[in-house]
Image: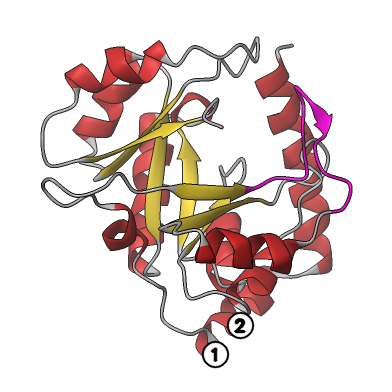
Amino acid sequence: MGVLQEIVERRKGRLRDTKASVPFEEIKARLRDAAPARDFRGAVTRPQGGRIKLIAELKKASPSRGVIRRDFDIEGISRIYTEGGASAISVLTEEDYFQGDISYILRIKGVTDLPVLRKDFIFDEYQVFEARAYGADAILLIASILSNSQAGELYGLASELGLSVLFEVHNYKEVDTALLLDLPIIGINNRDLETLDIDLRRTVDIMKDIPDGRVIVSESGIE
């Protein structure tokens, strides 16, 4: 079993536990009091001739590096990103491999006006509602863990809830899926999710196949 599949299987187990402790109807009820989502797509869209937009990431740990930052001051780091000119903030919420937590989203939004992207391994509609209920403005959908129909359904649901979607691809076939579904924001991950190796040329190569009019995000390996 590769690293990605291992993470997804663990995530499925976690989700079963979450659904048992926080029923779906309770998550949906929380949406009634949710503030409107901030415009993630607008924030990361680069105007013609304008500066490159930066999505700054909050990540305590990773499978490739272990614990990255033990002193994980979420509010402090979020303020630094905001003052430093980031266009949006991304936060890992997966618990076992990235030591994330869904509650981080609300803590970030308490100290910044930037839109917040929930990065996780999302494959179930519960997770989309959960993201919105906890204040996310956008979610990550990873092409390699979803069928075309799953991707389309989750994107449609996210749009109905006012969430932007960053659709992550790793190869040309997954780009075809993004174009077929007419997804406006396409992320190209420079990291191979099975080997965890990084190749920054992946963005340069793959983006050539993406027509104008899409927002392209280069992910991973940029420090």
Dividing the picture into quarters, in which one does residue 33 lie?
Answer: bottom right
- Amino acid carrying label 1: it is Asp
27 sits to left or right of 82 = right
Gap between marks 1 and 2 measured at Cα: 6 Å
> Does residue 94 lie above or below 8 as drawn?
below
- Reading the image, the residue beneath label 1 is 33
Cβ–Cβ below 8 Å for labels 1 and 2? yes
- Relative to 95, is 24 above or below? below
Residue 42 visible to an observer of this rendering: yes
Q: Is 29 located above or below residue 185 in the figure? A: below
Residue 68 image offset from top left, x and y in percent: 80, 37
Residues 182 and 92: in front is 92
For label 2, the residue is 30
Taking the image as drawn, is residue 125 in sight? no
Q: Which residues are magenta?
A: 58-71
Q: Position of residue 19 (x, y in %)?
A: 75, 60
Q: Secondary structure at mark 2?
A: helix
Judge whether residue 27 is colored magenta. Answer: no
Q: Amino acid at mark 2?
A: Arg
